[in-house]
């Protein structure tokens, strides 16, 4: 009998990739979307016609209970969040309500709807919980046992979500697994994220639609993988005999400058400096210097490993944006 899954954050890049994966595996897929007019709703209805949309909100417990009663899922993937780190500094209260308290609301909705012992829950935790400070930075990358020291309202809210999920696992015996995912990018990333901002700008520069890109700091390093690979790890976590936490990462770290170098090479430009400007407005009050994950546990226990390497990720994103911008009118 086919399984049923409920996904929050269905309009985001992870929601898109996960919905595709689950559909291919024969799942009946439900996706939660806020009731207010959502500009991405039409995209979901067009590109993911097999997703059953339920109107609900992570900040509204009663709507989540209704969503659970409607979908009756065996698996719930909580991907929804105010997920842009820079934005979280400007709207910390909203970030706390959605990214932090929203996890608690979803867990309570599962309990109140009678799914405490039958529903498997995935919580999207994040590498931003570690903070990247030198004192807590392991030589070979952060593991599931590493110390947390979040450096943004987003990271703090995610850490609350991570710990409340852990608490429900320990307190109520719920099947709750947390995926501590390092930066995962792709062609479905929003344009507000630096990787997609770069790939899209590079495409537009190639096509003569703009002549430069404005960024913040260029030195931070991240462990960048492809989002399509990471949703496979999410699914595998909920197929285990017991719940647990897993780091999903590539085990490599690359700077924004490296991303720029590869992206511009895709359009035949070796020196990107004349095309890049920096603006303090894009620099954060507290920046994470370096993030590097150790995916050893996920590789051994889940049999998971990333497929797309760093150059392949950049190439995939630039090629997508070149095609996208070529199909659009000059603007």
Image (tube, grey):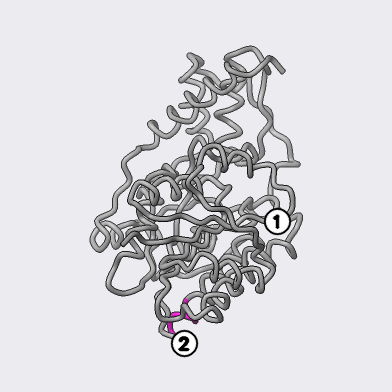
Does residue 130 sit above or below 175 in this rendering? Answer: above
- Label 1, label 2: how far apart the Cα atoms are: 32 Å
- Residue range of the region highlighted in magenta in the rendering: 166-171
Residue at image mark 2: 171
Q: Which mark is residue 133?
A: none
Whether 167 is among the magenta residues is yes
Residue shown at the point (62%, 63%) measured from the top left: 99
Image location of residue 252, percent across then percent down: 37, 46
Residue shown at the point (56%, 81%) measured from the top left: 112
| Viewer-nearest residue: 294 or 300 | 300
Secondary structure under the numbered disc 1 in the rendered image: loop
Residue shown at the point (47%, 70%) measured from the top left: 147
Tell which circle, 1 or 2, labels the residue nearer the N-terminal end: 1
Please state if 44 lies on the left or on the right of 181 as rendered: right
Secondary structure under the numbered disc 2 in the rendered image: helix
Q: Quadrant of the C terminus?
A: top right
Residue at image mark 1: 35
Q: Is the C-beta separation of discs 1 and 2 under 8 Å?
A: no
Place residue 34 in its image quadrant.
bottom right
């Amino acid at each position: 009998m086919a399984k049923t899954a409920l996904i929050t954050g269905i309009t985001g890049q992870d929601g898109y990739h996960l919905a595709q994966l689950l559909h291919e595996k024969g799942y009946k897929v439900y996706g939660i979307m806020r009731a207010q007019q959502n500009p991405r709703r039409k995209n979901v209805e067009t590109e993911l016609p097999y997703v059953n949309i339920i109107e609900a909100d992570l900040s509204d417990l009663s709507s989540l209970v209704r969503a659970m009663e409607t979908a009756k899922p065996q698996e719930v993937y909580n991907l929804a969040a105010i997920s842009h780190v820079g934005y979280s500094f400007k709207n910390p209260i909203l970030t706390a309500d959605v990214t932090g308290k929203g996890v608690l609301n979803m867990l309570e909705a599962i309990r109140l709807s009678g799914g405490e012992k039958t529903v498997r829950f995935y919580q999207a935790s994040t590498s931003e919980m570690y903070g990247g400070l030198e004192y807590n930075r392991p030589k070979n990358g952060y593991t599931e046992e590493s110390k947390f020291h979040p450096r943004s309202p987003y990271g703090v809210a995610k850490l609350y979500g991570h710990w409340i999920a852990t608490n429900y696992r320990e307190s109520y015996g719920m099947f709750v697994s947390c995926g501590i995912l390092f930066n995962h990018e792709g062609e479905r990333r929003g344009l507000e994220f630096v990787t997609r901002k770069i790939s899209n700008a590079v495409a537009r520069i190639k096509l003569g639609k703009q002549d430069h890109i404005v960024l913040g700091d260029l030195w931070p390093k991240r462990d960048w993988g492809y989002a399509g690979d990471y949703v496979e790890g999410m699914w595998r976590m909920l197929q285990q005999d017991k719940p647990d936490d897993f780091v999903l990462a590539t085990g490599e770290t690359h700077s924004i400058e490296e991303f720029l170098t590869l992206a511009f090479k895709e359009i035949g430009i070796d020196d990107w400096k004349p095309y890049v400007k920096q603006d303090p407005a894009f620099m954060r009050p507290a920046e994470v210097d370096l993030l590097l994950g150790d995916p050893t546990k996920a590789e051994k226990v889940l049999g998971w490993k990333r497929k797309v390497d760093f150059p392949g990720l950049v190439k995939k994103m630039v090629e997508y944006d070149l095609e996208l911008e070529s199909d659009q009118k000059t603007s």
